[in-house]
Amino acid sequence: MPPSRQIYHVGLNAQLLSGQQSYRAAGIHRHILGLLAHLPGADSRFEYTVFTGEDAPVPDRALRVERTSLPTERPLSRIVWEQIVQPAVTGQCDVLHALAYVSPILTSRPTVVTVHDLSFLRSPERFRFANRNYLRLFTGLSVKRACRVIAVSQHTKQDVMTVYGIPADKIDVVYSGLDAHFKRPSSQAIEEFRAAHGLPERFILYLGTIEPRKNLSTLIRAYAKVRPAGVKLVCAGGRGWMYQDVFQTVEELRISRDVIFPGFLPDDDLPLWYSAADVFVYPSAYEGFGLPVIEAMACGVPTITTNASSLPEAAGDAALLVPPDDTTALAEALSRLLDDPSLRSGLAIRGPAQAARRSARRVRSAAPRARGRWAAAAPEERRGPRATRQGESS
């Protein structure tokens, strides 16, 4: 008779998945979506139930999905689900994995928590009061009671150790990874895309949520200093919160004809947007990982980002780095890159290799190591007949 194999049932809080074409479908949404696409094949010891909202996309049919009727895209409803409903509906799970910061405090089940960054502590002035204080309180409680903590970069791991006193051996680093479709399309595809969307012949691209932490006003002021002839600035992404300063800066500098805001961009089009740009700039003051930097480099786009937080870790030697609030330094980097074809060419060559070090394949190989400790977290009394399947090959 074939040996029995222990199967552990993991509940995944994916309430931050979004079906909306807005800033909610950026950042953490994309991290979760990529993770769900690879989890079923990462380790056969685990089965998963994804808990999410009514309109949220789930990429793999092998995943069991339980949808709530609560409007969890609204922060208050999501808090109610996380802290009150979740403990009641996850009774069949051996382990609960909070995919973004917060686990239910009133649960007896072992928990794993993913921390994307501590920007709500590092840059509190750039967050709304209620959001900042909920994350401040419940992230701290969640990581301290968790059996394992997953950080999306070495920088975030160090932050969690420093701020919360979590020991290094309790934290695993699993990068957000890179989907395989992020690569440079053919020249013909780029030109057809440029024509179809009426894109300028030359442009600088920013892509990310329009919110204070992304430091977009600094980029706009740097662009105004340079005013490169025939080069537009395209600031793409959904409007998050406290974004009025960005549009006010454009008006004050009288460059509205040169700065384009196309809004939220569909994920399938992103490689073409990156590849059509002359330069990609990501001026963020604080990031847990900095996925747009990796995506742009994978598409062979010369990239400028900042030397803050995890961004040097993401960029390696394949991008120019500047201080996050130094308008002059950013303006000089823009001028240098736009005027120096050999520098652009060198960064374009190094970019894909650096991005490959953060590829989805590497995430798949890291996932079993990080999540393999879920088995140790599951209490013995929950490893009964329900969790064992007979006659399965490993």
Image: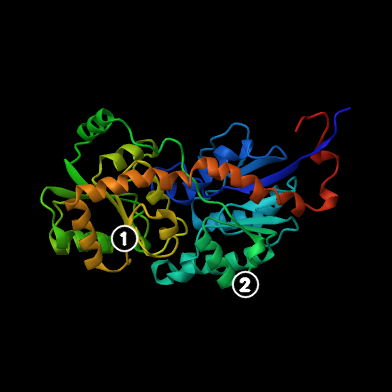
Q: Is residue 26 visible?
A: yes
Residues 339 and 92: in front is 339
Label 1: state its secondary structure: loop
Q: Quadrant of residue 315?
A: bottom left
Amino acid on which disc 2 is placed: Gly
Q: At x 23% / y 29%, what residue is drawn?
A: 192
| Percent x, y of residue 72 | 53, 50
Give whichever of 52, 207 is nearer the camera: 207
- At horizontal 22% and vertical 57% (from top left) the residue drawn is 334
Q: Is residue 242 above or below residue 341?
A: below
* Residue 335 vs residue 268, the one in the foreground: 335
Q: Residue furthest left?
A: 229
Question: Which residue is most to the right?
Answer: 1
Say which residue appears at 41% left-offset and 63% top-offset. Answer: 286
Q: Mark 2: which secondary structure? A: loop
Q: Which mark is residue 217?
A: none
Total number of numbered discs in the rendering: 2
Quadrant of residue 102 within the rendered picture = bottom right
- Residue 148: horizontal and vertical position, in percent? 67, 58
* Residue denoted by label 2: 165
Dots 2 and 1: beta carbons under 8 Å? no
Front disc: 2 or 1: 2
Instruction: Name the residue that disc number 1 marks.
Output: 243
* Between 142 and 190, the one nearer to me in the picture: 190
Three-letter amino acid code at the position of disc 1: Tyr
Give above or below for 314 relative to 196. Answer: below
Instruction: Please state if 175 lies on the left or on the right of 23 as rendered.
Output: right
Image coordinates for residue 353, horizontal then vertical, percent: 41, 44
Q: Is residue 87 left or right of residue 338?
A: right
Residues packed near mark 1 inside 10 Å, few (<14), some (14 to 19) or many (20 plus): some
